[in-house]
């Protein structure tokens, strides 16, 4: 993974489509300018893994999450979450088991678009991180749908 950007500006060497996508996701998540560089780092790590043919493991997802939100090191949350629509995330006591199950059921390349979207929605319902869940889900969406070269905004599931 090329991390030379960490010593310059986070946009250096990126195509405009990716810059726009990262800015959009960070603005949507109401995070500061520094988080754009962190999101880039997580995106680059996940893309390198995907291009190497890796299947996400818990260790890899924790690494990506830690790059996206280094203040929390990809920690699993231990508190309740209520979504804007009034719905609830998976109870904190069940997060570890839910994450383990989600990782085991990664849809993979041959899965339908619907199965990939369903998996992503479930990942967001688990809402496993202390912070950075939406940004991590955005990276995972690019992986699931192989949209690295033309990143799409995170699917709006109505949370």
Image (cartoon, helix red, strand yellow):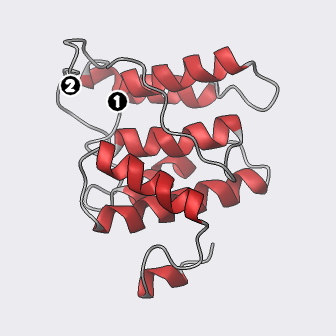
Image height check: is 83 above or below 15? Answer: above
**Location of residue 158 by image quarter:** top left
Quarter of the image with the N terminus is bottom right
Image height check: is 39 above or below 114? Answer: below
Residue found at x 47% / y 20%:
122
Which percent across, then down, holds residue 38?
A: 40, 64
Image height check: is 91 above or below 60? Answer: above
Quarter of the image with the C terminus is top left
- Pointers 1 and 2 in contact (CB under 8 A)? yes
Q: In this orientation, does residue 58 appear?
A: no
**Location of residue 70 by image quarter:** bottom left
Which label was assigned to residue 81? 2
Q: Secondary structure at mark 1?
A: loop
Image height check: is 154 above or below 48? Answer: above
Which percent across, then down, holds residue 57?
A: 60, 43
Which percent across, then down, holds residue 133?
A: 36, 39
Residue extending farthest to the bottom is 7
Residue found at x 25% / y 61%:
71
Residue found at x 56% / y 16%:
118
Count the numbered circles shown. 2
Q: In this orientation, does residue 25 appear?
A: yes
Q: Residues within 10 Å of mark 1 (few under 14, many from 20)?
A: many
Please report whichever mark, 1 or 2, sits nearer to the chain's N-terminal start: 2
Which percent across, then down, holds residue 53?
A: 79, 50
Q: Residues within 10 Å of mark 2 (few under 14, many from 20)?
A: some
Please name the residue that numbered disc 1 is placed on. 127
Camera-nearest residue between 30 and 118? 30
Q: Secondary structure at mark 2?
A: loop
Which label was assigned to residue 47? none
The Cα–Cα distance between marks 1 and 2, rounded to whole angstroms, is: 8 Å
């Amino acid at each position: 993974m090329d991390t030379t950007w960490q010593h310059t500006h986070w946009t250096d060497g990126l195509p405009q489509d990716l810059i726009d996508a990262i800015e959009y996701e960070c603005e949507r998540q109401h995070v500061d300018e520094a988080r754009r560089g962190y999101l880039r780092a997580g995106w680059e790590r996940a893309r390198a893994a995907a291009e190497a043919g890796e299947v996400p493991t818990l260790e890899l997802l924790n690494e990506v999450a830690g790059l996206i939100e280094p203040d929390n090191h990809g920690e699993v949350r231990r508190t309740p979450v209520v979504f804007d629509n009034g719905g609830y995330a998976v109870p904190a006591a069940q997060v570890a088991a839910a994450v383990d199950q989600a990782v085991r059921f990664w849809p993979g390349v041959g899965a339908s678009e619907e199965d990939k979207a369903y998996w992503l929605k479930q990942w967001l319902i688990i809402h496993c991180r202390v912070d950075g869940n939406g940004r991590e889900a955005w990276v995972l969406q690019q992986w699931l749908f192989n949209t690295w070269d033309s990143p799409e905004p995170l699917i709006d599931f109505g949370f």
